[in-house]
Image (spheres, rainbow, N blue to C red):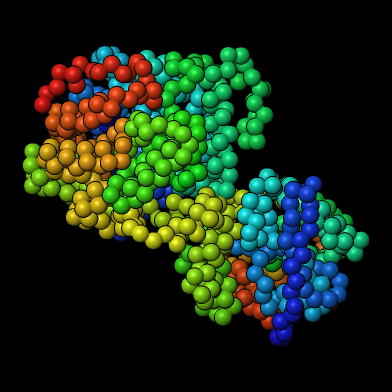
């Protein structure tokens, strides 16, 4: 299934006692869906276009990752505060009554899952794409290795098919060489802003709260995930009553890049059900 | 001018080709170590520092690195206290410079306040307290603290330590990172309200401004060579000093320089070249550049500035393959006869107005015998030429411990 590009607009919502202006990208039409991005920041992508054909997609940018506003991250001190910021933002966006769908990926999956556990009436449904947030000693998540390692090695953690178009697009630098230093500085800072709440181990005790999630949940994982190993699919699934787990073969951490059709089939099927 | 002997504590027996297989930090494999040789490497560093104290250096210096093969000094106050005790017993009035405990890395800053205070007592008030942020690999990988909080922690820890040293009564500390009900450390530093504070840094404008504002000493390390990046940093420092209304007292500035001296230039090359090459390649050259700036450690503007920087690139990025010729040409190390070494040092010291010089005379695989020759020769034939450099300008040096200010006998007598 292919999707035409949709118009994306920027909005800012003031939250956290006016200390933060949260930047949100919005597109599409229909009931609300919140997308929580992974460690490198928000990248608009075909998956969001597909979702925007059925939903109004709201994609907030993690504090500090919006260009021109790097110090915003200083206003959020702990992961607990980050959850409160997003809970406020849902209200400020006027989505509180409708109870949006939440879709979180990797780091964003941890955020979405913890929001759903902490505020059980915040969302109506939850989709988690290879979320962080749990830890098993026999399945370590190589966050430190990936983030402090050579950038050329990052695709090995993220993609089963590092040379696919989607994987190449994900790490592409601007065509204009003049813009490259700005882009590298921004993407590096973004990772600093997100890893603030994931370092060195992204375990805030989510395993002790997941039982509180009381909405339909889909968990999607790539069997060859080399960042958050597929062992965690079962960990999430077994802790969330009634959740559905879809493990996709020949697929790495960024499921929609490695297996766009199968990922979309799982996601759209669940959302339609 | 004050001249101190600085040492790292490398494992001196790294296998040939170490740099082609391993990193020197964080993941450096301990399996390459022979335990007896580790003991020897560490004990030699203590002995050489004491050798320097006896030879007439004004001070000795050490610093902190964890999980590293090039500087096995997870707590430099341990090393410094051993040297301080021995120096006291022998009546050697050397300053004890810890360059120091990393304030952005520590999870227990009060321990630093206590250890420094203890060291100031042990040394009879001769401590120079280094307050570095800590390298990114150390703070963010070894200590695993979120990179983006490194400087916030640094600032809070520095404030806490200064208050713990000088506040007469127990106080509560409600910080963001540290909370205590009753801070009341024993002992307090002999030097009140605090020992001289030296801050090592890479010379970013923000850091320099902070140092000048608080009237501390800025310490710059020569890894990139004084010729290349040194000039930019020193010019910036003195420009800022002028802008902020500070005087041009050279004792506001400290510089660390690697030096290797022998009887002649030829002999110096023959004796030291293999050790210097191995040192840079397997030590600094084997720290992955990504580990020096874990995302969040540097502000986006700083990263962009670095990427857009034109002008001379320092040696740091080429250390893994550094040749003796490059090392000497860039002055990353100054090597040669006493005349060669003294004249090169004197030239940049005068040009950049450096009042406190730290020289590093042991490198990588260099054995104790050769190191002690380097120390003795430097003390006898180079140091006496450097010491009077700033005398004619007549500056006070309030950043030197008063108890260490008397000229030690060995130096006053002079062997040269």
Number of marks in the image? 0
The percent coordinates of residue B50 (x first, y second) are 25, 25
The picture quadrant where one finds residue A253 is bottom right
Which image quadrant is residue A270 in?
bottom right
| Residue drawn at (58%, 34%) of the image | B156
Residue B397 seen: yes
Residue A209 lies, with reference to residue B93, above or below; the image says below
Task: Using residue B247 as the reference point, say whether residue B43 is left or right of it.
Answer: left
Q: Where is residue B405, by image quadrant? A: top left
Residue at horizontal 44%, vertical 17%?
Answer: B191
Q: Nearer the viewer, residue A160 or B288?
A: B288
Quarter occupied by the C terminus of chain B: top left
* Residue A133 visible in the picture: no
- Image point (35%, 15%), residue name: B403
Q: Nearer the viewer, residue B387 or B107?
A: B387
* Residue B114 vertical position relative to residue A51 in the rendered view, above or below: above
Q: Quadrant of the N terminus of chain B?
A: top left
Q: Position of residue B33 (x, y in %)?
A: 31, 44
Q: Position of residue B206 (x, y in %)?
A: 50, 44
Residue B264 higher or lower than B320, as above or below? above
Measuring 33% from the left and 47% from the top, which residue is drawn there? Answer: B230
Q: Nearer the viewer, residue B407 or B38?
A: B407
Where's residue B264, x and y in %? 7, 42
- Farthest residue to the right: give it: A97
Left or right: where B415 falls relative to A106 = left
């Amino acid at each position: 299934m292919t999707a035409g590009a949709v118009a994306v607009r920027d909005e800012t919502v003031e939250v956290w006692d006016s200390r933060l202006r949260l930047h949100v990208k919005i597109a599409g039409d229909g009931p609300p869906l919140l997308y929580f991005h992974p460690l490198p920041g928000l990248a608009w992508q075909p998956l969001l276009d597909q979702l925007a054909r059925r939903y109004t997609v709201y994609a907030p940018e993690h504090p500090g990752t919006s260009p021109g506003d790097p110090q915003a991250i200083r206003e959020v001190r702990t992961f607990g505060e980050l959850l409160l910021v997003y809970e406020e933002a849902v209200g400020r966006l006027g989505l509180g009554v409708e109870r949006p769908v939440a879709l979180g990926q990797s780091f964003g999956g941890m955020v979405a899952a913890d929001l759903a556990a902490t505020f059980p009436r915040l969302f109506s449904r939850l989709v988690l794409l290879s979320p962080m947030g749990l830890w098993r000693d026999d399945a370590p998540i190589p966050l430190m290795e990936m983030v402090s390692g050579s950038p050329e090695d990052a695709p090995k953690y993220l993609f089963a098919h590092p040379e696919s178009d989607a994987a190449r697009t994900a790490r592409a630098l601007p065509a204009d060489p003049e813009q490259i230093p700005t882009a590298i500085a921004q993407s590096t800072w973004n990772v600093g802003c997100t890893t603030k709440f994931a370092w060195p181990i992204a375990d805030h005790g989510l395993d002790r709260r997941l039982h509180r999630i009381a909405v339909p949940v889909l968990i999607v994982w790539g069997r060859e995930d080399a960042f958050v190993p597929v062992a965690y699919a079962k960990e999430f699934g077994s802790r969330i009553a009634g959740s559905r787990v879809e493990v996709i073969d020949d697929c790495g951490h960024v499921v929609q890049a490695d297996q766009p059709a199968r990922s979309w089939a799982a996601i759209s099927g669940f959302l339609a059900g | 001018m004050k001249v101190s002997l600085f040492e790292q504590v490398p494992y001196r027996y790294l296998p040939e080709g170490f740099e082609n297989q391993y990193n020197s930090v964080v993941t450096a494999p301990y399996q390459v170590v022979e335990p007896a040789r580790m003991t020897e490497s560490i004990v030699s560093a203590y002995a050489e520092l004491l050798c320097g104290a006896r030879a007439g250096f004004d001070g000795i210096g050490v610093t902190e690195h964890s999980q590293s093969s090039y500087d096995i000094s997870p707590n430099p106050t341990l090393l410094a206290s051993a040297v301080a005790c021995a120096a006291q017993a022998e009546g050697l009035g050397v300053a004890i410079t810890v360059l120091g405990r990393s304030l952005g890395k520590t999870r227990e800053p009060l321990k630093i306040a206590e250890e420094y205070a203890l060291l100031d007592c042990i040394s009879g008030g001769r401590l120079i307290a280094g307050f570095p942020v800590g390298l990114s690999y150390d703070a963010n990988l070894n200590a695993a603290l979120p990179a983006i909080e490194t400087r916030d922690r640094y600032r809070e820890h520095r404030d806490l330590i200064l208050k713990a040293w000088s506040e007469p009564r127990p106080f509560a500390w409600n910080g963001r990172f540290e909370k205590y009900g009753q801070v009341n450390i024993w002992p307090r530093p002999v030097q009140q309200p605090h020992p001289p504070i030296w801050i090592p840094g890479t010379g970013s404008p923000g850091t320099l401004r902070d140092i000048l504002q608080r009237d501390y000493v800025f310490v710059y390390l020569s890894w990139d060579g004084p010729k290349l990046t040194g000039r930019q940093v020193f010019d910036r420092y003195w420009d800022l000093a002028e802008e902020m209304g500070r005087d041009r007292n050279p004792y506001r500035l400290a510089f660390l320089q690697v030096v290797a001296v022998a009887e002649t230039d030829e002999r110096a090359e023959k004796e030291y070249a293999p050790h210097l090459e191995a040192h840079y390649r397997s030590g600094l050259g084997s720290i992955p550049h990504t580990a020096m700036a874990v995302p969040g450690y540097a502000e986006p503007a700083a990263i962009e500035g670095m990427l857009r920087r034109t002008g001379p690139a320092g040696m740091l990025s080429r250390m893994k393959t550094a040749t003796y010729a490059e090392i000497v040409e860039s002055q990353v190390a100054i090597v040669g006869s006493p005349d060669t070494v003294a004249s090169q040092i004197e030239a940049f010291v005068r040009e950049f107005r450096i009042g406190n010089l730290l020289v590093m005379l042991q490198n990588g695989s260099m054995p104790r015998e050769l190191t002690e020759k380097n120390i003795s020769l430097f003390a006898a034939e180079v140091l006496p030429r450097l010491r009077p450099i700033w005398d004619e300008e007549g500056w006070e040096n309030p950043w030197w411990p008063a108890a260490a200010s008397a000229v030690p006998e060995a130096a006053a007598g002079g062997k040269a």
